[in-house]
């Protein structure tokens, strides 16, 4: 069967174990043209997990999420929102770069639902180990992965929703096989908040306004952390 599930070792305990395994994933065709798997990064005891779309050109080369222009904007927004960057874990809904070659340029292509579905087991596995208190969904692709196709970021952004009850297939996130934090039990009070993607801010006609909107959404997360 296609999809990432068969590449996830049942005995993978830590995020590092998952990252190593993800390096060999062939759960969809995207591994073929991309340089490498770009797995999530950040503190394993992070209270907040931010989920983007997929690695960009720079991330594909460096093997790290959010190291390009969108990442720079995201870090600034996190800072302006008063979130502690040391309490964050950053990841993507899809872990290989999807692009189209035009001459020598690699042009970003939005992942399709088949890529999102194929890659989703990695996201579920990350959440099972991280057990975040708040999940931040950045843009439509992450929303498709976590909230399903009918969720509209533009209408429901900036709102704290119950997690994982609000997720598509919440049972995926309730079956938590591993607790390597030792600190948090199942987090029944965990919540989720959607906002726009940093790349959408960079593309906006009114960048300042779009940026301020993103910061305002992230500030809701800051205030929600006890
Ligand atoms: N955009 C994303 O969604 N993720 C990255 O890692 C970089 C850019
Ligand atoms: Fe595996 Fe995801 Fe890469 Fe597809 S995009 S090969 S499912 S890691």
Image (cartoon, rainbow, N blue to C red):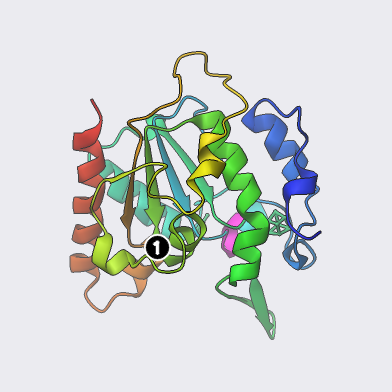
Q: Check disc 1: other Cα within 10 Å, few if <14, some if 14-19, many if 20+.
A: many
- The image quarter in which residue 84 lies: top left
Taking 87 as reference, is 166 above or below it?
A: below
Which residues are the magenta region? 55-59
**Residue 149 in sight here:** yes
Question: Where residue 158 sits: x, y (%)?
Answer: 23, 54
Quadrant where the N terminus is found in the figure = bottom right
* Residue 108 placement, left or right of 11: left
Which type of secondary structure does the marked residue at label 1 adopt? helix
Taking depth in this image into account, of 88 and 94 the one nearest to the observer is 94
Quadrant where the C terminus is found in the figure = top left
Taking depth in this image into account, of 80 and 98 the one nearest to the observer is 98
Residue at figure coordinates x 64%, y 74% from the top left:
99
Taking depth in this image into account, of 149 and 53 the one nearest to the observer is 149
**Residue 96 in sight here:** no
Residue at figure coordinates x 39%, y 30% from the top left:
47
Q: Count how many numbered circles sit on residues in the image.
A: 1
Q: Which residue does the numbered mark 1 point to in the structure image?
A: 139
Question: Where residue 70 sits: x, y (%)?
Answer: 43, 60
Query: Residue lying farthest bottom?
Result: 103
Residue at figure coordinates x 55%, y 50% from the top left:
65
Residue at figure coordinates x 25%, y 30% from the top left:
225
Taking 98 as reference, is 105 above or below it?
A: below
Residue 205 among magenta residues: no
Q: Is mark 1 within 8 Å of ligand 1?
A: yes
Secondary structure mostly seen in magenta is helix
* Residue 147 placement, left or right of 76: right
Question: Where residue 29 sits: x, y (%)?
Answer: 77, 67
Question: Where residue 192 sits: x, y (%)?
Answer: 34, 45
């Amino acid at each position: 069967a296609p999809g990432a599930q068969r590449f996830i070792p049942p005995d993978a305990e830590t995020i590092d174990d998952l990252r190593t395994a993800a390096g060999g994933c062939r759960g969809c065709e995207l591994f073929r043209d991309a340089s490498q798997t770009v797995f999530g990064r950040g503190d394993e005891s992070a209270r907040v997990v931010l989920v983007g779309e997929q690695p960009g050109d720079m991330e594909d080369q460096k093997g790290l999420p959010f190291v390009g222009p969108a990442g720079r904007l995201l870090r600034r927004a996190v800072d302006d929102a008063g979130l502690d960057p040391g309490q964050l874990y950053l990841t993507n809904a899809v872990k290989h770069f999807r692009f189209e070659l035009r001459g020598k340029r690699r042009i970003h292509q939005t992942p399709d639902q088949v890529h999102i579905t194929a890659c989703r087991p990695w996201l579920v596995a990350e959440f099972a180990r991280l057990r975040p208190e708040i999940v931040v969904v950045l843009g439509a692709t992450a929303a498709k992965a976590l909230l399903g196709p009918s969720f509209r970021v533009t209408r429901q952004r900036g709102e704290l929703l119950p997690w994982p009850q609000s997720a598509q297939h919440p049972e995926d996130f309730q079956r938590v096989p591993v607790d390597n934090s030792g600190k948090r039990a199942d987090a029944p009070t965990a919540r989720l908040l959607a906002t726009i993607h940093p790349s959408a801010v960079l593309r906006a006609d009114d960048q300042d306004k779009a940026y301020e909107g993103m910061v305002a959404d992230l500030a809701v997360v800051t205030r929600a952390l006890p």
